[in-house]
């Protein structure tokens, strides 16, 4: 019997997804819940589990193709006996009850037997030009690969796989030189330096920013490069346009002497009992913001146009803007107001690592009541951040710099930071925005003042 698996609803109103890579091929036998493919939505890279146990009859989309929710994605021969499965049909009769509605909710088995742990498998095929490379330049040849051998899928993160794809590099070949460890971006660069002709290699500085191989140089004769707008960047662009032209933005700035905060951080880092926590300026600002929001609830709210109401939240789901290879995302820390400084530091670190590895889930990107953008990590002092849709405030944290500063009636070399607060002027007036900045600044100037806020 033939059965089609259609792209399921991935949540948060997402209507389409791009196929990043297939982990199975026609003719493969798959187990229930085995991962079939990685797809990239407007928010995250998601692994799709198989709702069937059977043989792959056909793939209805190529890697790099965008598929609408509900469209056929892959077709199975669930009994493994159909020698000529239909490969061109756009609509295949299926048992709708066997289809999962949301990724992660599991699927009912369509064949007997216990679910098996998915194997990390890949069909590796030798390239036709390998023989020519071996004959012309043995030292440049890539490791030999057996034709149509089912092998262990190379271990790497989604951003590294996407990066290798842009460079046209097969990670199975890179894996031969790195052994059992996870393949990193530097491993891909090193392999490219040995196998890709010099004239075709992207500039290392441009590699770090994810520029495609054909846009590697401004002097290669190309007058322009067109990069498809999709995935996270497409979603971010739409969200920023919606926010900028819906909510009237106001941005206010305040430069703060944070010497006492930096001294506190140094003492906490020297404390062996806190050595496992990476407490830094961002964690302290996050704690100060959570405390300050209790006194300025308008900055922890949203404008509900349909209901004609302002919704103030009794909790803080703190968004932290994260720059990734796939674009800007804002995952959030749930109930951040209830976390200690050390717990906040751990949450910020975990969030950043997950975002860089491309493992942030749609759930972690949904919601958020107030956000922080750490522009200081790029050496920037101040900016005018745009509000994430549905939020009334976002705080940009500038770089900490040593500057001459008035201190106790004299000029001294102090560590200062500029805070930039953007807010929705429909909800927050200038006085409330100024009060919030002053509360945050007071904590950063004298951390002991945190004891006075609740």
Image: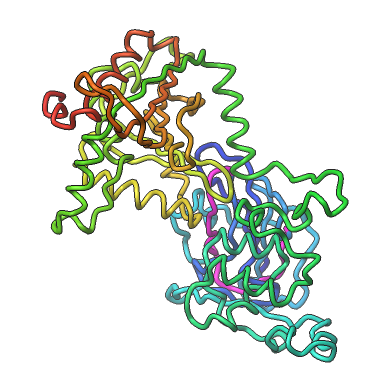
Which one is nearer the viewer's eye here, 380 or 438? 380
Q: Position of residue 83 (x, y in %)?
A: 75, 78
> Does 255 appear above or below 71?
above
> Which quadrant of the rendered structure holds the C terminus?
top left
The residue range painted magenta reads 42-61
> Which quadrant of the rendered structure holds the N terminus?
bottom right
Residue 310 location, quadrant: top left
Which one is nearer the viewer's eye here, 196 or 260? 260
Q: Is residue 366 left or right of residue 217?
A: left
> Does 370 appear above or below 185?
above
Q: Is residue 54 magenta?
A: yes
Q: Position of residue 245 (x, y in %)?
A: 59, 17
Residue 173 location, quadrant: bottom right
Residue 320 location, quadrant: top left
Which one is nearer the viewer's eye here, 196 or 22? 196
Q: Residue at x 43, y 35 (%)?
A: 373
Q: Residue at x 41, y 22 (%)?
A: 421
Q: Is residue 239 left or right of residue 198?
A: left
> Does 334 appear above or below 420?
below
Q: Is residue 68 left or right of residue 242?
A: right
């Amino acid at each position: 019997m033939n059965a089609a698996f259609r792209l399921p609803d991935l949540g948060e109103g997402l209507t389409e997804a791009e196929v990043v890579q297939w982990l199975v091929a026609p003719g493969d036998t798959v187990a229930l819940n085995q991962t079939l493919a990685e797809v990239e939505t407007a928010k995250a890279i998601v692994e799709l589990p198989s709702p069937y146990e059977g043989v792959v009859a056909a793939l209805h989309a190529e890697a790099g193709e965008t598929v609408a929710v509900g469209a056929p994605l892959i077709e199975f021969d669930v009994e493994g006996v159909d020698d000529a499965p239909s490969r061109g049909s756009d609509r295949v009769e299926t048992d709708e009850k066997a289809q999962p509605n949301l990724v992660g909710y599991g699927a009912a088995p369509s064949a007997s037997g216990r679910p098996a742990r998915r194997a990390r498998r890949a069909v590796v095929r030798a390239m036709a030009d390998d023989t020519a490379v071996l004959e012309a330049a043995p030292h440049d040849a890539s490791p030999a690969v057996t034709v149509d051998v089912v092998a262990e899928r190379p271990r790497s993160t989604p951003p590294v796989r996407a990066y290798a794809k842009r460079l046209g590099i097969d990670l199975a070949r890179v894996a031969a030189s790195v052994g059992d460890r996870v393949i990193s971006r530097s491993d891909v660069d090193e392999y490219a330096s040995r196998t890709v002709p010099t004239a075709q290699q992207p500039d290392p500085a441009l590699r770090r920013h994810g520029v495609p191989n054909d846009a590697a140089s401004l002097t290669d004769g190309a007058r322009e490069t067109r990069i498809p707008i999709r995935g996270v960047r497409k979603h971010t662009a739409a969200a920023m346009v919606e926010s900028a032209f819906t909510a009237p933005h106001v941005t206010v700035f305040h430069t703060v002497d944070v010497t006492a905060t930096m001294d506190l951080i140094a003492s906490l880092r020297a404390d062996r009992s806190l050595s496992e926590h990476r407490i830094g300026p961002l964690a302290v600002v996050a704690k100060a913001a959570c405390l300050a929001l209790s006194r300025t609830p308008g900055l922890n709210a949203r404008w509900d146009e349909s209901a004609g109401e302002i919704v103030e939240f009794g909790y803080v789901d703190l968004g932290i803007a994260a720059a990734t290879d796939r674009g800007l995302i804002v995952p959030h820390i749930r109930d951040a107001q209830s976390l200690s400084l050390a717990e906040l530091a751990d949450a910020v670190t975990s969030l950043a690592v997950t975002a860089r590895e491309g493992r942030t889930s749609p759930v972690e990107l949904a919601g958020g009541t107030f956000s922080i953008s750490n522009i200081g990590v790029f050496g920037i002092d101040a900016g005018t951040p745009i509000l994430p849709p549905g939020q009334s405030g976002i705080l940009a944290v500038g770089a900490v710099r040593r500057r001459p500063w008035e201190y106790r009636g004299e000029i001294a070399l102090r560590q200062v930071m500029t805070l930039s607060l953007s807010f929705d002027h429909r909800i927050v007036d200038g006085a409330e925005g100024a009060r919030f900045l002053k509360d945050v600044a007071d904590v950063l100037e004298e951390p002991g003042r945190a004891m006075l806020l609740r």
